[in-house]
Amino acid sequence: MECKYYKTLEDKRVECQLCPHHCHIAEGKTGICRSRRNDGGLLVSEVYGKPCALAIDPIEKKPLYHFHPGTQCLSLACTGCNFRCLNCQNHDISQVSLSDVPHYELSPEEVVRLCQKHHCPGIAYTYTEPLTYLEYITDCARLAHEAGLWNILVSAGYVCQEPLNDLLPYLDAANIDLKSFSDDIYRRISGGHLQPVLDTILAMRDAGVWVEITNLVIPGVNDDLDMIRQMCRWMVDNNLADNPLHFSRFFPRYKMMDISPTPLQTLKAAKQVAEEEGIQYVYLGNV
């Protein structure tokens, strides 16, 4: 399927305008996300209608603790991500191309029917980076709303504002992975920048989407308590003090196998800092 957010360049190259990377993609190549390919001067989504993962999860697994607790959701993912996190938990599906893993053929209409068949009140777009297949989840989410289902986005939030604005009317809740409060750490660990993620969180807040934030605390990387305090102050200053903050425990994964799990005392210290700064609901995850 042809993508919506791009412009054509010379020599059949294209510029993807979905996320802040603005990848310039030569004919036959893909962008950083591996899921959007230049097909003869047209940018196409290779994963539209082709999820690689389907499951029924408790909503708390997203994690969302203040949005319909005790319910389940249909979880859906396609391959691809526009980050390159060294600690990626799902690198076997996020850091690969469609051809590298088995997948389903599932139209948006079939996604909604599957959700209804299993009596799930909502759909979660999760596991990888759903914003890299935004056209697919927008079509799914629109039909879900028409059927009375709600939509959840679990994302790193790295997207341009125009595409995000097209999706926001169909979103009910989101958990955004705020990886740190340092642009340098974002660049070194994930290959991106901080500010676009903050812009996404604020756009969701303004659109009335329920937002919860997860911060994975990695020893020696983003566990500085002064930086965590700055992050919490930003939340309070931007009217997010009542939005849950989840500090999640790191375990060795992917290209960070040499780093030990986060000490529990570090997570408890982060929780104390958050509460001191005025965050009302602070949770510890993976403990």
Image (cartoon, grey):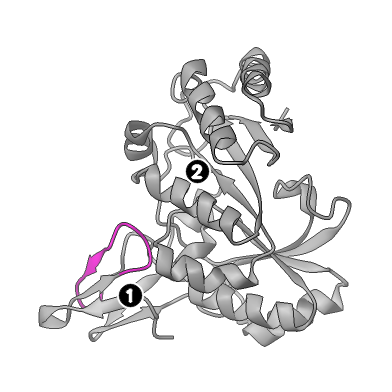
Crowding at dot 1, Cα within 10 Å, few <14 / some 14-19 / many 20+, comes out as many
Q: Position of residue 178 (x, y in %)?
A: 52, 40
* Residue 237 location, quadrant: top right
Q: Residues within 10 Å of mark 2 (few under 14, many from 20)?
A: some
Q: Is residue 192 above or below residue 137?
A: above
Residue positioned 52% across, 51% down in the render: 202
Across and down, in percent, residue 71 comes to: 86, 57
* Residue 88 rendering spot, x and y as whole percentages: 50, 43
* Residue occupying image coordinates x 58% and y 73%: 137
Total count of labels: 2
Q: Secondary structure at mark 1?
A: strand
Task: Tell me if I can see residue 128 in this picture.
Answer: no
Main secondary structure along the magenta-highlighted residues? loop
Helix, strand or loop status at disc 2: loop
The answer to which of 128 and 173 lies nearer the viewer is: 173
With respect to residue 262, does 253 lie above or below?
Answer: below
Q: Amino acid at mark 2?
A: Cys
Please give the residue where the numbered disc 2 appears in the rendered image: 88
Q: Is residue 209 left or right of residue 147?
A: left
Residue 246 visible in the picture: yes
Amino acid type for the residue under numbered disc 1? Arg
Residue 106, image x and y in percent? 63, 82
Q: Which residues are magenta?
A: 17-28
Quarter assignment of residue 9:
bottom left
Compared with 239, 225 (above or below) is above
Residue that numbered label 1 is attached to: 37
